Amino acid sequence: MALKIAIGSDHAGFELKEEIKKILKEKGYEFTDFGAKSLDPQDDYPEYGKKVAEAVSSGKYDRGIAICGTGIGISIAANKVPNIRASVAYNTEMAKISRLHNDANVLALGGRVKTQEPISDILTVWLETPFSGDERHKRRINQIKEIEKSKSDVKC
């Protein structure tokens, strides 16, 4: 079964998102574009990070790809959604480890950042690498889930 992918970007990630959509289509992946639809600077990363993350968290999509200028801001926004583990990856090693160790379900990329390797290589590694299932990594992911549960108890 092919992965269903949610993809979204702000204005700074728009061009990279369009490039990634072509790669996904060539590789036969099913995806939905959650925006932005242009280079309009009013298209801010929190909105699109949230849309992608909620699509993945809902279970309707297997993975997400979220893009802003650096990948950092949109990953922060996406990680506010329960059950999301968004990770920035600028090379294949980061992409691989984010899946093997962290079971990252959202890949965050930067449209204004030069990647160390071709984006198609980073995508391929991230999409094709399974979670290792190693007990120590499961334990750590469960600890992250406990943080998510407890954050609702925090009063400011």
Image (cartoon, rainbow, N blue to C red):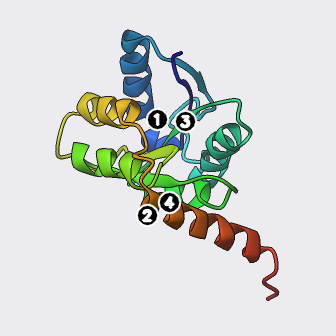
Mark closer to the chain start, 2 or 1: 1
Q: Position of residue 61 (x, y in %)?
A: 64, 30
Residue depicted at x 71% and y 30%:
60
Q: Position of residue 150 (x, y in %)?
A: 74, 76
Reading the image, the residue beneath label 1 is: 14
Label 1 and label 4: CA atoms lie apart by 15 Å
Amino acid on which the number 4 mark rests in the picture: Gly
**Marks 1, 4: nearer the viewer:** 4
Residue depicted at x 46% and y 58%:
135
Please, what secondary structure does the residue beneath circle 4 have? helix
Circles 1 and 4 in contact, beta carbons < 8 Å? no
Please, what secondary structure does the residue beneath circle 2 have? helix
Reading the image, the residue beneath label 4 is: 73
Query: In this view, which residue lies farthest toward the front?
Result: 135
Label 2 and label 3: CA atoms lie apart by 22 Å
Residue depicted at x 63% and y 32%:
34
Res. 152 visible in picture: yes
| Left or right of 132 on screen, residue 1 | right
| Left or right of 3 on screen, residue 125 | left
Mark closer to the chain start, 4 or 3: 3
Reading the image, the residue beneath label 2 is: 136
Q: Position of residue 53 (x, y in %)?
A: 64, 45
Mark closer to the chain start, 2 or 4: 4
Res. 114 visible in picture: no
Label 1 and label 3: CA atoms lie apart by 19 Å
